Structures are given as structure tokens and as C-alpha cells.
Image: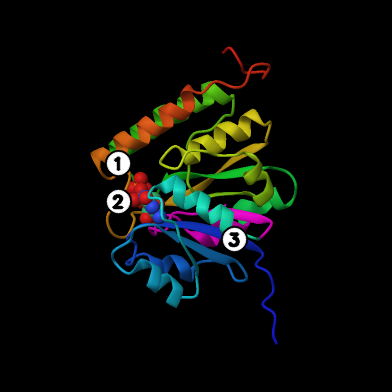
Amino acid sequence: MTLTPPAVADVVLPCLDEAAALPGVLARIPPGWRAVVVDNGSTDGSARIAADLGAHVVREPLRGFGAACHAGLLAATADLVCFCDCDGSLDPALLPALAAPVLAGEADLVLGRRRPTARGAWPPHARLANLELARRVRRRTGLPLRDLGPLRAARRTALLSLGLTDRRSGYPLEMVVRAADAGWRVRETDVPYVPREGRSKVTGTWHGTWQAVHDMSAVLAVRPAAGHPRAGR
Ligand SMILES: Nc1nc2c(ncn2[C@@H]2O[C@H](COP(=O)(O)OP(=O)(O)O)[C@@H](O)[C@H]2O)c(=O)[nH]1
Ligand SMILES: [Mg+2]
């Protein structure tokens, strides 16, 4: 019997109807790393395509971006867990460099700051909403962040200890806010952001953008626990 060696890292890929992007994204997962594709409602065969391409596919019954990310985190087994969108806009091949400070013990959470490389990578309304949210995150957490990028890396047990509860668009922001409240060393590093394959499910639509701003605002409205250095601010 041959035993498959454990993956160096798990890459959680939330996926909703990304048949067009999946082959390119999965081809760029670093060698020895495991792709964990989390599907909760695709109707374009994404789950089958991902499985055929060798990804570990998780089917989460609850709809939502946060539900998918969290199901991926729960399914992960490696010490290092990364997150990446599954739309071709971000390059998973950059993850080993992005995660290096976590593995070196120099940071607890590293976020990729999206730097658009072409027109159309980031619709203006989404970019504006993101700038405003980043400003509010700086005020709330004291962290000098410029983005709430979905390409990220942290240790699995540490992520689980944050006890994240959002299951929609507030999940990535809740991760950052709770990490800051827990005193994590959070870093941001530039990553190229290119136009996605296929159609946007979140900020490409007015409803998706509204929901993202609404969910993130709800996360920001929760104050730090009493006794916390930032409580009462
Ligand atoms: N499983 C799952 N994935 C989702 C959901 N919403 C978005 N995604 C995925 O999350 C990633 C980011 O969504 P995307 O549509 O690119 O949002 P945008 O970057 O704001 O335009 C993509 O890989 C989507 O397929 C969802 O409800 N469930
Ligand atoms: Mg996208």
C-alpha cells in the first residue's frame, strides 16, 4: 500500500459556477499542496470538473461565501491553510511566497493586497466600497491595511481558534477583525489582480455588492469585548 504524503498546505477555493476558471486555477496550485474546492450550489458542473482535475471537493449545503470558506477550513488537515478565489483573478502559485512569513513564525496572517494589472480587473464601485471598508478596518483594528484581499495564509489551528461565525460576505473581514483583537501579527503583501474568468457572483452585481457592504458593516458594528485595549473606541 502506498501512503500519500500529507499536503504541505491546504488551499481553500470557494467555488460557485467557475467551470471556465477551474482548470487554470488548479493548474497553478503549488506542487505538494492540496486544493480544497468548496461548492455549494454550482449548476455548471464545477464540482465534477474539480474532482476530475484531482482537487479535494467539499460540498457545503449552506449557501454563501463564508459558509464555503469555513467548510474548507474545517475540511483542511494541513498545518498551513491558504484561501484563494476560484475565478482566475488571483494566482495560487504566489501562495508559497505569501505564506513564507507565517511558516517562518514572523506573521500570523498574511493578506494579498490586490494590485490590478489591467482594466476591468476591479469594477470601480467595488474598488471604492473596498477602500472605504479598509479605512473602517484601520480605524477599528489599528492595522495599516489597504485591502481585505481574499488571497491569504495562516495556521489552521489558529484560524479555528478565532471562532468565526459569519457565513456570508462578512467572513473575510471577520477573520481580520478577530485576528487583530487576538493580537495577531497581520501583514499585507502586494499581489497582481487580473480580470476574472466568467461572471462575478459578489461585487460584480449591485445585489452582491450591497450584501457584501451590509455583511461587513455588521461585523464592524460588533465592538471588541470589554477590557480589550480597543474597547470603547
Ligand atoms: N461556494 C461558494 N463560492 C462562492 C460563493 N459566492 C462566491 N463564491 C466564490 O468566491 C470567489 C469570489 O467570488 P467572485 O464572484 O469572484 O466575487 P468578486 O471577486 O467580488 O467579483 C469565487 O471563486 C466565487 O466562485 C458562494 O456562495 N458559494
Ligand atoms: Mg472575483
Residue 60, position as x, y percentages in the image? 44, 56
**What is the C-alpha distance between the residues marked 3 and 2?**
24 Å
Q: Which residue is mark 2?
A: 200
Q: Which residue is mark 1?
A: 208
**What is the C-alpha distance between the residues marked 1 and 3?**
27 Å
Considering depth in this image, is 190 or 133 the residue closer to the camera? Answer: 133
Instruction: Establish whether ligand 1 lies closer than 8 Å to the Cβ of label 2.
Output: yes
- Residue 84 within the magenta-colored segment of the rendering: yes
- Residue most toward the left? 206
Q: Is residue 29 visible?
A: yes
Residue 67, position as x, y percentages in the image? 45, 48
Residue at 47% x, 29% y: name it: 219
Q: Is residue 117 visible?
A: no
Asked if residue 141 lies left or right of residue 49, the reply is: right
Q: Amino acid at mark 2?
A: Ser
Give the secondary structure at mark 2. loop
Residue range (magenta): 78-96
